[in-house]
C-alpha cells in the first residue's frame, strides 16, 4: 500500500526532476517504525543526475509522509526513507561482464 501511495504522489507532484523515477519496492520493518522506499532512476543514473533526484526526494519526503499517514488508517505509520534500488544497474553490469568474457573467448 505504501508503494502505491508514494508512486501516485510522486506522479501527482509533477516535479520534473522526478519524472523518470520508479518506485520499485518498499520494505517495512516489523515494528512499523520505518519503511525503506526503493526507487530506480536508470536514465538519470546514466546521465549522472542521481544526486539531484536524492535531493528532490528528500525535499518532498514530508509531504509524501503526510499522505501515507492519512491514507493508512493505523495507530502507527512507518517513517519513510528513500533508497536507490541498484538491482537494475547491477544486472546490467553483470551482463556487460558476461558479454566481455564471451567476446574474449
Image (cartoon, grey):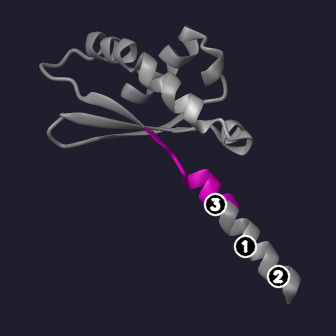
**Image height check: is 16 above or below 49?**
above
Residue 12, image x, y percentages: 55, 10
- Work out whether residue 53 or residue 94 is closer to the camera in this orientation and state it: 53
Query: Which disc number belongs to residue 14?
Result: none
**Residue segment shown in magenta:** 83-92
Q: Which residue is mark 2?
A: 102
Q: Residue at x 60, y 59 (%)?
A: 90
Say whether disc 3 or disc 2 marks the residue closer to the N-terminus: 3
Q: Is residue 31 left or right of residue 63?
A: left
Query: SS class of the residue under badge 1?
Result: helix
Q: Which residue is mark 1?
A: 97
Say whether disc 3 or disc 1 marks the residue closer to the N-terminus: 3
Q: Is residue 81 magenta?
A: no
Residue 72, image x, y percentages: 27, 17
**Image height check: is 80 above or below 27?**
above
Quadrant of the snapshot with the N terminus? top left
Q: Are marks 3 and 2 in contact (CB under 8 Å)?
A: no
Q: Are marks 3 and 1 in contact (CB under 8 Å)?
A: no
Quadrant of the snapshot with the C terminus? bottom right
Q: Which residue is mark 3?
A: 91
- Single out the mark in the foreground, 3 or 1: 1
Query: SS class of the residue under badge 2?
Result: helix
Residue 84, image x, y percentages: 50, 43
**Image height check: is 56 above or below 66?**
below
Query: SS class of the residue under badge 3?
Result: helix
Measure the C-alpha gap from mark 3 to mark 2. Answer: 17 Å
Q: Residue at x 39, y 16 (%)?
A: 64
Amino acid at each position: 500500500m505504501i508503494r502505491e501511495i508514494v508512486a501516485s504522489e510522486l506522479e501527482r507532484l509533477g516535479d520534473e526532476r522526478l519524472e523518470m523515477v520508479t518506485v520499485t519496492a518498499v520494505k517495512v520493518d516489523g515494528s512499523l517504525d520505518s519503511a525503506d522506499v526503493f526507487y530506480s532512476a536508470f536514465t538519470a543514473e546514466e546521465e549522472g543526475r542521481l544526486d539531484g533526484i536524492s535531493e528532490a526526494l528528500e525535499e518532498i519526503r514530508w509531504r509524501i509522509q503526510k499522505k501515507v499517514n492519512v491514507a493508512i488508517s493505523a495507530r502507527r505509520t512507518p517513517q519513510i526513507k528513500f533508497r536507490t534500488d541498484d538491482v537494475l544497474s547491477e544486472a546490467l553490469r553483470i551482463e556487460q561482464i558476461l558479454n566481455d568474457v564471451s567476446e574474449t573467448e
